[in-house]
């Protein structure tokens, strides 16, 4: 039977106290709803239907690229009403899996088990046992241990609230039966809403087999209702991602102090120290060492590189056996060839640094091309911006730039040239020559420092 997945994502999330709709709140730097849809896609469904409502324009603007059928729920009249909005586009001979846009940690393996547990005709429910079930709907069973209904916490009696088996809200049902049950539920409850959970009692009354359980964990079904829930889910996600990274063969000095907010591909024998943040798409070669308190975003780091502590690398390509940092910043479009070095308090942008070249201390090099084995001294600046346009600096192979120099672009320092310390270079410097631009040093005889009266 074809599988259709309905994701309920219309809620406001008032407890988040945010102008952002709840399903757009970031988890691992991606919206909650994105996590759910990506997991759903792993089941290869015939179609994913996302029911959205609150903040409709924001949701569509942010996530309109997703390959889903968008179903608008103008009035949020409950979960049953939301599924009813989507069921019209689903054929009777399909099975329907219902997910929630604010339950982002559910695993595809758990969902696969849920969809297969009941076969073609049963109603399958994902339930878990909680030590503290407060706030969750309780699973009601008869004397024969058969599921006969679900009661929401707010509608439960004192005895029912002692039940620890809770409804996660995730279920799978035959589309034709689900359509019939949704037409028969009502809003006669304390919330005045159409509860999707009411279909369970209808299924029991229709003598439809109800399969409850399927082994999901409490972590997987953690819903996001407020900022504390979001923070807890972030830690759960990061713990899961740390385990996956270590399974690739990466050493994490402390898995509790590692954040992956994107996708990491790593070669063998990489070591990542504490409080490292990986964002976007990052590739590490073999034997890469990342020092503590470092952020790497959308970059590739070659084999054998060392990134020392407190460095920031974004949209950069780093060749093999490079040394970076500490306290270095590689801004977008930085390219380092093999064995290049970018040292402490150095910032680069839109620069190509040749093999073996060094920018070791306290420098800014932007919009520049450095050849092979160039040495850039401390405090060097490429003056690349004239207030209206950027200009490029070209430094040839083997050039030596003395400390505290300003290279005013556009300018070229030819191969083998030496620039004396403290120079301001506004014209091209010839190959193999020493170029110096300094004021004449003068000692004034008889001069005395002023004194306070």
Image (spheres, rainbow, N blue to C red):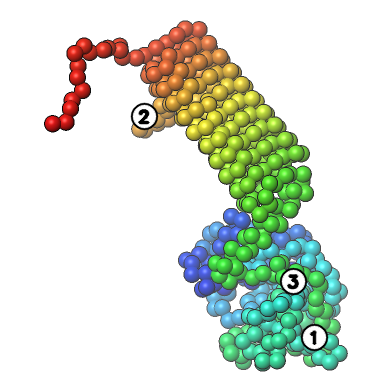
Frontmost of labels 2 and 3 is: 2
Q: CA distance from mark 2 to mark 3?
A: 59 Å
Is any part of residue 315 visible from this angle?
Answer: no
> Is 171 left, or right, of 393 in this rendering?
right
Mark carried by residue 147: 1
Earlier along the polypeptide chain: callout 2 or callout 3? 3
Residue ID at (65%, 44%) = 273
For label 2, count other residues whose C-alpha is less than 10 Å away and answer few (under 14), some (14-19) or many (20+). Answer: few
Badge 2 marks a residue whose secondary structure is loop
Residue 95 placement (x, y as % from top left): 78, 72
Residue ID at (52%, 37%) = 327
- Reading the image, the residue beneath label 2 is 386
Badge 3 marks a residue whose secondary structure is strand
Residue ID at (75%, 77%) = 129
Mark carried by residue 97: 3
Which of the 4 quarters of the picture holds residue 297? top right
Give whichever of 381, 408 is nearer the camera. 381
> Is 386 left, or right, of 446 in this rendering?
right
Q: CA distance from mark 2 to mark 1?
A: 74 Å
Give whichever of 368, 219 is nearer the camera. 219
Q: CA distance from mark 1 to mark 3?
A: 19 Å
Q: Are marks 2 and 1 in contact (CB under 8 Å)?
A: no
For label 3, count other residues whose C-alpha is less than 10 Å away and answer few (under 14), some (14-19) or many (20+). Answer: many
Earlier along the polypeptide chain: callout 2 or callout 1? 1
Residue 397 placement (x, y as % from top left): 56, 15
Q: Quadrant of the N terminus?
A: bottom right
Badge 1 marks a residue whose secondary structure is strand
Residue 30 placement (x, y as % from top left): 60, 56
Residue 333 placement (x, y as % from top left): 55, 34
Q: Does 86 sit above or below residue 317?
A: below
């Amino acid at each position: 039977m074809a599988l259709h997945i309905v994701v309920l994502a219309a809620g406001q999330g008032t407890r988040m106290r945010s102008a952002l709709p709840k399903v757009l709140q970031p988890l691992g730097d991606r919206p909650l709803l994105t996590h759910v849809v990506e997991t759903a896609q792993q089941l290869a469904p015939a179609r994913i239907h996302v029911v959205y409502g609150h903040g409709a324009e924001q949701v569509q603007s942010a996530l309109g690229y997703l390959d889903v059928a968008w179903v608008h729920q103008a009035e949020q009249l409950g979960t049953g009403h939301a599924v009813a909005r989507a069921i019209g586009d689903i054929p009777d001979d399909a099975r329907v899996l219902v997910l929630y846009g604010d339950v982002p940690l559910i695993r595809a393996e758990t969902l696969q088990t849920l969809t297969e547990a009941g076969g073609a005709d049963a109603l399958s429910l994902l339930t878990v046992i909680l030590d503290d079930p407060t706030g969750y709907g309780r699973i009601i069973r008869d004397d024969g241990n058969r599921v006969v209904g679900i009661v929401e916490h707010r509608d439960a009696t004192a005895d029912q609230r002692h039940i620890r088996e809770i409804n996660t809200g995730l279920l799978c049902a035959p589309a034709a039966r689900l359509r019939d049950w949704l037409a028969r539920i009502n809003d006669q409850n304390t919330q005045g809403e159409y509860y999707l959970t009411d279909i369970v009692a209808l299924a029991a009354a229709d003598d439809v087999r109800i399969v409850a359980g399927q082994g999901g964990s409490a972590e997987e079904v953690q819903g996001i209702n407020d900022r504390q829930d979001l923070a807890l889910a972030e830690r759960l996600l990061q713990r899961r991602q740390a385990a996956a990274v270590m399974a690739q063969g990466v050493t994490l000095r402390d898995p509790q102090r590692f954040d992956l907010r994107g996708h990491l591909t790593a070669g063998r024998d990489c070591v990542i120290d504490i409080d490292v943040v990986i964002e976007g798409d990052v590739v590490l070669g073999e034997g890469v060492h990342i020092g503590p308190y470092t952020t790497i975003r959308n970059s590739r780091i070659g084999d054998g590189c060392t990134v020392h502590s407190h460095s920031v690398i974004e949209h950069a390509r780093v060749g093999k056996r490079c040394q970076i940092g500490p306290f270095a910043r590689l801004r977008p479009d930085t390219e380092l060839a093999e064995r290049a070095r970018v040292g402490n308090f150095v910032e680069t942008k839109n620069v190509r640094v040749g093999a073996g070249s060094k920018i070791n201390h306290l420098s800014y090099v932007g919009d520049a091309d450095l050849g092979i084995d160039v040495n850039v001294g401390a405090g060097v600046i490429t003056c690349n911006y004239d207030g209206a346009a950027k200009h490029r600096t070209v430094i040839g192979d083997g050039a030596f730039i003395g400390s505290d120099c300003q290279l005013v672009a556009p300018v070229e320092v030819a191969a083998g040239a030496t620039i004396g310390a403290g120079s301001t270079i506004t014209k091209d410097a010839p190959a193999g020559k020493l170029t110096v631009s300094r004021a004449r040093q003068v000692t004034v005889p008889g001069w005395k420092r002023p004194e306070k009266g």
